[in-house]
Amino acid sequence: MKKIKQNPMYLYLMVLTISSTIGLQAWRTLFDNFAVRVVGLNGDHVGIIQSVREIPGFLALLAVFVIMLIKEHRLSALSILILGIGVAATGLFPSFGGLLVTTLIMSFGFHYYETTNQSLTIQYFDKNTSPWVFGKLRALSAASNIGIGIFIYLVASFLNFTQLYLLIGGLIAAAGIWGFFQDPVDQNIVPQRKKMIFRKKYWLFYFLTFMAGARRQIFIAFAVFLLVKKFHFTVQEVTILFVINNLINYFISPLIGRSIIRFGERAVLSC
């Protein structure tokens, strides 16, 4: 594992993954209170915005064509920069239309990074170590979520939404700029095939991914909004819920990675 941690791509992905995670978590933590208390949106508006948020996720399949024009690790850095810009701009446009646009920008950055993140991990780490890397990155993501949650909890009482979005988004954009000046590429790895591949034998994975996306969309779109709109949860109370959730993920994610190495993907997914 020490050799893995010394891999320049591991450090590169670690920094950008932490940035991506902080960006999305901060946006999610603040969004519903911002939408209800500042912008005055209702469930229909939030449903539309959350649906728009998933458009870049669907269009992430076009990443395979984008990397024909730009190196994949550069696309990762660019995605983090776009994510940071989207988050920073959110508080500056407190309207339904403003949230639609900033959400779209933020989501493009997040989804394109997630696409390249997984691709680079599989390219640079073999099948015996990549599950550990995925698990470690997920654990770091959970730790980052906890950290940004604590930060928001502490400063939300004296910083407004606009200031929070600008501060967090600015830090994420800085990480994206940092990524442009790094060169973690290993010239000795097997060149990646730049085309879309569909395999009939992977139908179960495609189906589970589809169902997981549907479940996540329903939860993200309405669960926290309901807590804020109907039960008047504050930013601090929403933050506590996310912190508890991510504490659980922090300890479980590495165990899942090691389980995949030992028992295989199918056995773990079946559980």
Image (cartoon, rainbow, N blue to C red):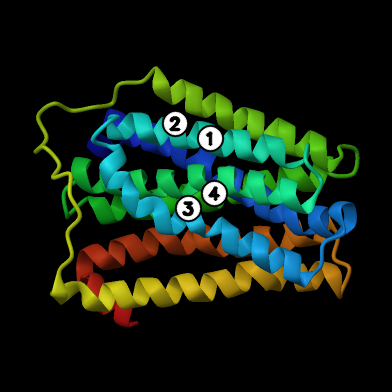
Q: Nearer the viewer, residue 114 or 15?
A: 114
Quadrant in which residue 219 is drawn? bottom right
Q: Nearer the viewer, residue 3 or 30?
A: 30
Residue 244 appears in view: no
Q: Is residue 144 above or below residue 172?
A: below
Q: Is there CB contact under 8 Å for labels 3 and 2?
A: no
Q: Going from the N terminus, do you reach mark 4 or mark 3 first?
A: 3
Q: Is there CB contact under 8 Å for labels 1 and 4?
A: no
Q: Is there CB contact under 8 Å for labels 1 and 2?
A: yes
Q: Is residue 182 above or below residue 252?
A: above
Q: Amino acid at mark 3?
A: Pro
Q: Is residue 212 above or below residue 249?
A: below
Quadrant in which residue 28 is drawn? bottom right
Q: Is there CB contact under 8 Å for labels 4 and 3?
A: yes
Cα–Cα gap, marks 3 and 1: 12 Å
List the residue tagged with mark 4: 107
Q: Going from the N terminus, do you reach mark 3 or mark 1 first?
A: 3
Cα–Cα gap, marks 3 and 2: 15 Å
Callout 1: SS: helix
Q: Residue at x 57, y 43 (%)?
A: 105
Q: Amino acid at mark 4?
A: Ser
Callout 4: SS: helix
Residue 149 vs residue 163: left or right? left
Quadrant in which residue 162 is drawn? top right
Q: Residue at x 44, y 53 (%)?
A: 138
List the residue tagged with mark 2: 78
List the residue tagged with mark 1: 82
Q: Residue furthest top?
A: 181
Q: Amino acid at mark 1?
A: Ile
Cα–Cα gap, marks 4 and 2: 13 Å
* Residue 5 image offset from top left, x and y in percent: 31, 36
